[in-house]
Amino acid sequence: MTTQLENEFDIRISKRSCVYREIMAERNQVEVHKWLESEKRGKDIGYEKALMSWVRNHRNQWLKFRRKRLLGID
């Protein structure tokens, strides 16, 4: 059985991982997209619809931009 301290340590380590940071950055982009699209339509479009829309319409460009920025390429 893991202790509270071990769980907190695992959470701190995972939040520092580059995989976690990338997932959270992508999630943030989906949240922004959800907000923008919901504002355009005058109602909440929901996370799933926003996610699918963002993946279809924006993810590839965002990934290219993100990789260039992370690698320091202009």
Image: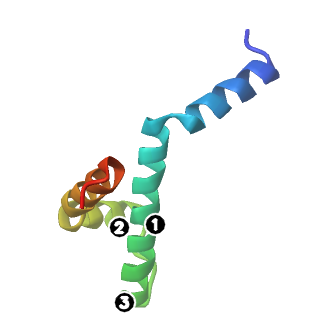
Residue pictured at 57% horizontal, 31% vertical: 14
Looking at the rendered image, the disc whose residue lies closer to the viewer, 1 or 3, is 1
Q: Which mark is residue 64?
A: none
Measured as percent of width and height from the top left, residue 15 is found at 58, 38
Q: Provide the residue designation for mark 2.
A: 50
From this view, report whether residue 48 is shown above or below residue 44. Answer: above
Measured as percent of width and height from the top left, residue 44 is found at 45, 78
Image quadrant holding the C terminus, namely bottom left
From this view, report whether residue 15 is shown above or below residue 69. Answer: above
Residue pictured at 42% horizontal, 68% vertical: 46
The answer to whether marks 1 and 3 mark residues whose Cβ atoms lie closer than 8 Å is no
Q: How is colour applied across the structure in the image?
A: rainbow
Side of 29 where 9 appears, left or right: right
From this view, report whether residue 16 is shown above or below residue 5. Answer: below
Q: Nearer the viewer, residue 29 or 17?
A: 17
Q: Which mark is residue 31?
A: 1
The answer to whether marks 1 and 2 mark residues whose Cβ atoms lie closer than 8 Å is yes
Disc 3 residue type (three-letter) = Lys
Question: Which quadrant of the figure has residue 50?
Answer: bottom left
Furthest residue toward top: 1
- Sequence-wise, the earlier of marks 1 and 2 is 1
Q: Residues within 10 Å of mark 1 (few under 14, many from 20)?
A: some
- Sequence-wise, the earlier of marks 1 and 3 is 1
Q: Residues within 10 Å of mark 3 (few under 14, many from 20)?
A: few
Side of 22 where 17 appears, left or right: right
- SS label for mark 2: helix
Residue pictured at 45% horizontal, 77% vertical: 35
Disc 1 residue type (three-letter) = Glu
